[in-house]
Image (cartoon, grey):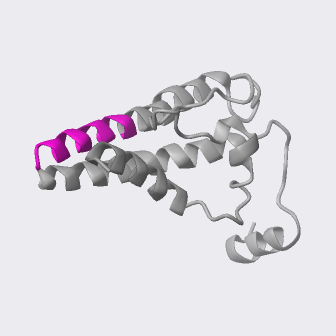
Amino acid sequence: MDRKLFLQNSAILAGATILPTASAFSPNLEINVMDKLTDANCNFIQQSLPYAENFLEPYMDAETLHLHYTFHHGGAMKGANKDMENIRKAMDSNSFETVDYYTKKLAYHFSSHVMHSIFWTNLTNKKTAPAGKLLKDIEKDLGS
């Protein structure tokens, strides 16, 4: 296995380790395209939102959603791809201190990409309120 393939596989495996098989997120990996984090070439990708940008109004306006999705989540995905590119270059030149630096950056960008991919699938435009034990715990701990 060459270094490039090793790094690609390592990134995918590292990401997979943070997703437990019993989580609510993991069944969606096969049926929900929003949850696909990489393309066939192992580049990180940002899927289209599963709803229109104004879908979350009045709780999140279209402009805020657009900025968050495009620049914040999109920036994390682009950063993760750039980090992978820099890791590959550093490995090719045997600059292992540089590999360590970009691996830490990749951990930040990749985790942000994963968390945002989960975030978008958990939003709704329906008003919801805590109930049951959650409501009791909030009232007990926060007094409201």
Where does the C terminus fall, quadrant-wise?
Answer: bottom right
Front in this rendered view, residue 11 or 123: 11
Q: Which residue, as the protein is rendered here, is positioned at the far right?
A: 132
Overall secondary structure of the magenta section: helix
In magenta stretch: residue 144 = no
Residue at 67% from the left image edge and 29% from the top image edge? 49
Along the viewing direction, whichever of 31 and 141 lies nearer the viewer? 31
**Relative to residue 58, is residue 80 depicted above or below?**
below
Q: In the image shown, does 25 or 128 lie closer to the viewer?
A: 25
Residues shaded magenta: 80-94
Name the side, left or right, on which 39 lies relative to 104: right
Which sits in the foreground, 9 or 24? 9
Residue 24 location, quadrant: bottom right
The picture quadrant where one finds residue 143 is bottom right
Query: Image point 87% across, 64% down: which residue?
Result: 131
* Number of on-image labels: 0
Inspect the magenta stretch and tell me whether residue 85 lies in it: yes
The image quadrant of residue 14 is: bottom left
Question: Which residue appears at 25% of the width and 41% of the height?
Answer: 88
Res 129 visible: yes
The residue lying at 82 percent from left, 60 percent from top is 130
134 over 60 or under it: above or below: below
**Residue 4, how many percent across, how many down?**
30, 43
Side (left or right) of 45 relative to 3 = right
- In this rendering, the answer to whether 131 lies above or below 38 is below
Question: Residue 11, image x and y in percent?
Answer: 41, 50
- Please say whether residue 122 is visible from this viewpoint: no
- Measured as percent of width and height from the top left, residue 67 is found at 53, 26
